[in-house]
Amino acid sequence: MMVDEQYNGLSSGYGKDAVVQLVRAFASEGLPVDPESWLRAYFVAGGDFRHADSINKLVTEMRSGVKHRVQSRYVDNIFQLISDRVQSRSSTVETLVP
């Protein structure tokens, strides 16, 4: 989802909104606000290296308690929707692979 917004940068605008809201959603489910983990996920999803500094900076600031003002980009239950999508794909793969 962050990768979809990288075309215009991730340090401001819709890109920043996406990063901050996704980190908050995952943190509220108990996952760590860890820059390394978020960078790994971003790169696995096909993220561009030129935006790594922006993600690192935002996540580091969030971990230290900075409250970023962003516009809502996703529904409140975005974590559950992503989780359901991942589980659905993994069950599809299990049925295709004997």
Image (cartoon, rainbow, N blue to C red):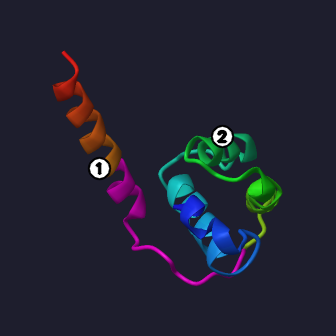
Q: CA distance from mark 1 to mark 2?
A: 21 Å
* Relative side of 38 to 93, left or right: right
Q: Is residue 33 above or below residue 18?
A: above
In this view, the residue in front, 75 or 3, is: 3
The numbered mark at residue 40 is: 2
- Which residue is painted at 68% across and 81% down in the image? 13
Of residues 89 and 8, the one drawn nearer to the viewer in this rendering: 8
What secondary structure is marked by label 2? Answer: helix
| Residue 82 falls in image quadrant | bottom left
**Circle 1/circle 2 CB separation < 8 Å:** no
Quadrant including the C terminus: top left
- For marks 1 and 2, the one nearer the N-term is 2
Residue 33 screen position, x and y as percent: 67, 50
Secondary structure at badge 1 equals helix
Total numbered circles: 2
Q: Which mark is residue 17?
A: none
Q: Residue at x 74, y 78 (%)?
A: 12
Q: Is residue 78 magenta?
A: yes
The type of residue carrying mark 1 is Asp
What residue appears at the point 19 percent right and 27 percent down from the top-left corner?
96
Q: Which stretch appears magenta?
A: 68-84
Badge 2, how many Cα within 10 Å: few under 14, some, many 20+?
A: few
Residue receiving disc 1: 84
As shown in the figure, which amino acid type bears the numbered disc 2?
Arg
Q: Nearer the viewer, residue 39 or 61?
A: 39
Measured as percent of width and height from the top left, residue 25 is found at 51, 61
Q: Residue at x 54, y 65 (%)?
A: 4
Residue lying at the far top of the rendered structure? 98
